[in-house]
Image: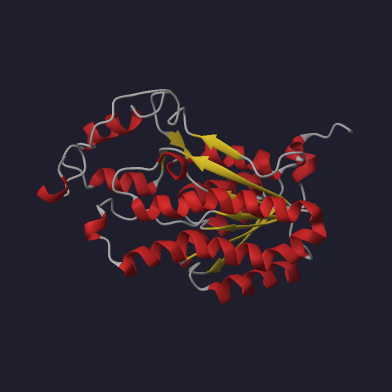
C-alpha cells in the first residue's frame, strides 16, 4: 500500500456533518475543513451555522456550507443530501453527530412523549441520514461515522432515554457495517465520554456547587479531566480517512478511561429526584 500523507488522503473529500453548530459537531466541522474536506453541515440555529460557515470560508481553511435543519425533519435531511451532491458532485463521508441529552430523571418522571422525542432525535435521524446518504456513499466507497456514547455501554443514572438510543446506535452501527461491507462502505462509531461542551457548561451553571460538580465529573475519568471537543474530532477525522481503510464496525472510545477498571458505586450527589427514588 502506497504511503500517503494524511492531508492528501482527505483533500477534496465531501462530508455531511449533522449537528454542526455546537460542541463536538462544531469541532468536527472545523477539523475536517482544516484537512481540506468540503463540509456541508446543518443545525437549528441559522445564526450560529452561518457564522461558523462564514468564518471558515473567510479564513480559507476549507469549504463549509450550512443549511438550517432540525434532524427530526427527515425530508429536510434528504433534501440536504441531494443539495450536497448537486453542488459537489459526490458524497464521501456522513457523520451523524446531532443529539439530545435530556434532563436526568427517573422513569417515573419520563412521559412517552419525552421518550419519543429522544428516540426521534438520537436514533431515527441517524437511520434516515444513512438511508438517504448510502446510495452516494456506495458510489464513492465512502464511510459513515455515528456518534454514540460510552453511556450506551455502561448505562447512566437518570439517563434511561438517552442510554436507550446510544445503546441502539452500538448495534445499529455494527449491523450496518456488515450490510454495507459488500458495497465498500465502512461504518464505525465514536463513543465519547465526558466532553467539555456548551451542553456541559449549561449543566454546570445550574448546579448549586458548580466547582464541586466539575471536580466530580472530572474524577470519573482515569485521566482526571473531561475531554475537549477537538479531541473527539481528531479521532473522527482518523476514522474517516484512508488511514483507517481496514476498520469497520468498530467503536472508538474517546473517554479518558471512563469505562475502565473498578470503582465505588454510589448515587450521583448532584441529582435531586425526590424521596421516591432515594436508595
Seen at 80% across and 41% down, the residue is 8
Residue sitting farthest toward the left: 275
Give the percent coordinates (x, y) of residue 131: 65, 66
Seen at 69% across and 50% down, the residue is 177
Relative to 76, does residue 119 appear above or below in the rendering? above
Q: Quadrant of residue 204?
A: top left
Does residue 237 appear in the picture of this structure?
yes
Give the percent coordinates (x, y) of residue 274: 12, 49
Does residue 145 appear in the picture of this structure?
no
Seen at 41% across and 44% down, the residue is 197
Residue sitting farthest toward the right: 2
Q: Quadrant of residue 271?
A: top left
Q: Nearer the viewer, residue 109 or 22?
A: 109
Seen at 42% across and 42% down, the residue is 151
Quadrant where the image shows the C terminus: top left
Give the percent coordinates (x, y) of residue 179: 72, 56
Give the percent coordinates (x, y) of residue 95: 61, 53
Quadrant where the image shows the N terminus: top right
Side of 139 where 265 appears, left or right:
left
Side of 85 where 226 appears, left or right:
left
Q: Nearer the viewer, residue 240 or 56?
A: 240
Amino acid at each position: 500500500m502506497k504511503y500517503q500523507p494524511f492531508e492528501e488522503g482527505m483533500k477534496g473529500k465531501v462530508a455531511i456533518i449533522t449537528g454542526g453548530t455546537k460542541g463536538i459537531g462544531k469541532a468536527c466541522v472545523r477539523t475536517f475543513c482544516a484537512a481540506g474536506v468540503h463540509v456541508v453541515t446543518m443545525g437549528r440555529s441559522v445564526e450560529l451555522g452561518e457564522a461558523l460557515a462564514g468564518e471558515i470560508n473567510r479564513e480559507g481553511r476549507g469549504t463549509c456550507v450550512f443549511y438550517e435543519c432540525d434532524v427530526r425533519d427527515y425530508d429536510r435531511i434528504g433534501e440536504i443530501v441531494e443539495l450536497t451532491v448537486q453542488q459537489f458532485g459526490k458524497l464521501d463521508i456522513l457523520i451523524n453527530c446531532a443529539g439530545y441529552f435530556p434532563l436526568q430523571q427517573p422513569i417515573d418522571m419520563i412521559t412517552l412523549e419525552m421518550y419519543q422525542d429522544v428516540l426521534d432525535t438520537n436514533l431515527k435521524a441517524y437511520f434516515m441520514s444513512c438511508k438517504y446518504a448510502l446510495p452516494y456513499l456506495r458510489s464513492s466507497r465512502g464511510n459513515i461515522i455515528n456518534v454514540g456514547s460510552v453511556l450506551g455501554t455502561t448505562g447512566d443514572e437518570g439517563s434511561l432515554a438517552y442510554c436507550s438510543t446510544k445503546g441502539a446506535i452500538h448495534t445499529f452501527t455494527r449491523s450496518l457495517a456488515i450490510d454495507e461491507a459488500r458495497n465498500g462502505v465502512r461504518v464505525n462509531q465514536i463513543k465519547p465520554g465526558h466532553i467539555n461542551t456548551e451542553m456541559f457548561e449549561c449543566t454546570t451553571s445550574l448546579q448549586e456547587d458548580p466547582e464541586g460538580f466539575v471536580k466530580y465529573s472530572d474524577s470519573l475519568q482515569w485521566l482526571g479531566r473531561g475531554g475537549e471537543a477537538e479531541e473527539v474530532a481528531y479521532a473522527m477525522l482518523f476514522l474517516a480517512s484512508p488511514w483507517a481503510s481496514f476498520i469497520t464496525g468498530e467503536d472508538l472510545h474517546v473517554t479518558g478511561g471512563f469505562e475502565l477498571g473498578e470503582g465505588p458505586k454510589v448515587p450521583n450527589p448532584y441529582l435531586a429526584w425526590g424521596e421516591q427514588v432515594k436508595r
